[in-house]
Image: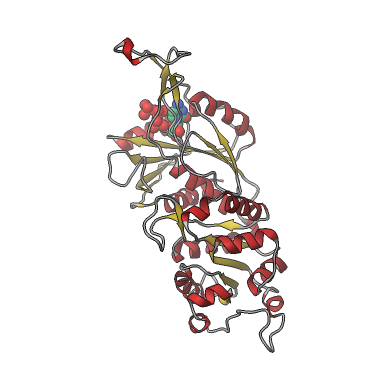
Amino acid sequence: MPFTDRHVVLGVSGGIACYKSCTLARRLTEAGATVDVALTAAAAEFVRPLTFEALTGRPVLTSLWERGRALAHIDLAKHPDLIIVAPATANILARCAMGMADDLLTALLLARADRPVLAAPAMNDAMYANPATTANLTALAQRGWQFIGPEIGALAEGPSERPGRMSEPEAIFAAAERLLGHGTTSKWSGKRVVVTAGPTREHLDPVRVITNPSSGRMGYALAEAARARGAEVVLVTGPTELAPPTGLHTTQVETTEDMQRALQDLIPNADALIMSAAPADYRPKHQADTKRPRSAGALTVELEATPDILGSLKRRKGMVVVGFALETGNGLANARSKMQNKALDFVILNDATEPGAGFEVTTNRVTILGRNGTQVDLPLLPKRDVAERILDVVEEAL
Ligand code: CTP
């Protein structure tokens, strides 16, 4: 069993997603882990300690001040192989970012800063978008915390288009498994990974652009997943509505040529390049300095091709290069010829005409083709799960 002889502390802070932590506690226990649950006072309002005791077969810790168990957190903190905080509310993230130790869970996290921490943020979407939360997440990521989620989806107060919902227990379990499995020997630790995301934009004049509907979600999910595996990640992104992920460096670009320039600077030091961006392939041959009035009548624009970024980059020897092929027919053949022409190690094929795949959606259905003839057909999955499967393949090639 993957977690045999592993000691996991599951810290549960007070959000409605607590109910999912019960499933996570059970899943970890079934996988062979010794699971000590530390509940904050607010979490104990949502789920009674008895529930976790029954699921883990171990006493649950709720307070620094329990009689007969003074300083229990220090005992607990001696050996954990991993500390999971799920849900991690905005409040506990803020307290940990400040280095506070005013209850058992925060004391434990402060006392054992050398242990790997995996946190699954869960909160109202506006709280997650608040710059205070972003700053706290960044501070914790800089101290080595790993994060999974939050996801977009229904919140306690109703549906939401923005992240806030805690990742599912199975996804947190998988992330924990990866962290424990890799530990400090992660194939990704110390590896520099460059990920591109989103569309690029080419100006016709100061107010009009040529672009495409890429949301950037696939690239952002890849960047976050690579960071969670321990890589040093730089995300080069065109204009998107997504918040910059925490714990990695984000470079914003606008045009295809800007993206090419940013990559030229980054590639000499990179171990892997994942080109999930959808750079604009054409730009106006002449760009007007002033807005062309509509009253001037019909407009004919001559377009020229933008640089082929993948085709133009001088690559570091041994760098793993992944390209994407968004097709609308004859996918396999086109993807294979892109792999050949662009000298890719892998090409990720997706079909823009398929429901749930491609641009502007939170799911994707892809086929991963390898240079050595491998082909992995994945089912329709959330983009974060697709990202993990892509990284599994890249990992073997690193
Ligand atoms: N790409 C690139 N530079 C461009 C356009 C695309 O490096 N100017 C990258 C994409 O990020 C992707 C891969 O090339 O990883 C394939 O992109 P795609 O748009 O499918 O292919 P194109 O090269 O544009 O070829 P075609 O338009 O003929 O399908």
On the rendering, which quadrant does ligand 1 occupy?
top left
Q: Nearer the viewer, residue 82 or 338?
A: 82
User: Residue 302, how many percent across, how many down?
Assistant: 37, 13
Which residue is painted at 68% across and 82% down in the image? Answer: 65
Figure check: 355 above or below 292: below
The answer to whether any part of residue 4 appears in the image is no
Find residue 224 and report its horizontal and vertical position in percent: 53, 49
Residue nearer the viewer, 268 or 80: 80
Q: Count how many numbered circles sit on residues in the image.
A: 0
For this view, does 281 lie left or right of residue 45?
A: left
- Residue drawn at x 28%, y 45% is 355
Q: Kindly identify the residue that appears in the image at 41 percent across and 49 percent down.
A: 383
Q: Position of residue 286 (x, y in %)?
A: 44, 12
> Is residue 105 or residue 356 the one in the foreground?
105
Toward the bottom, the furthest residue is: 68
Residue farthest top in this picture? 296
Q: How far across and down, in percent of the image, does residue 330 sit?
A: 28, 34
- Residue 278, above or below 257: below
Question: Visible in this render: residue 151?
Answer: yes
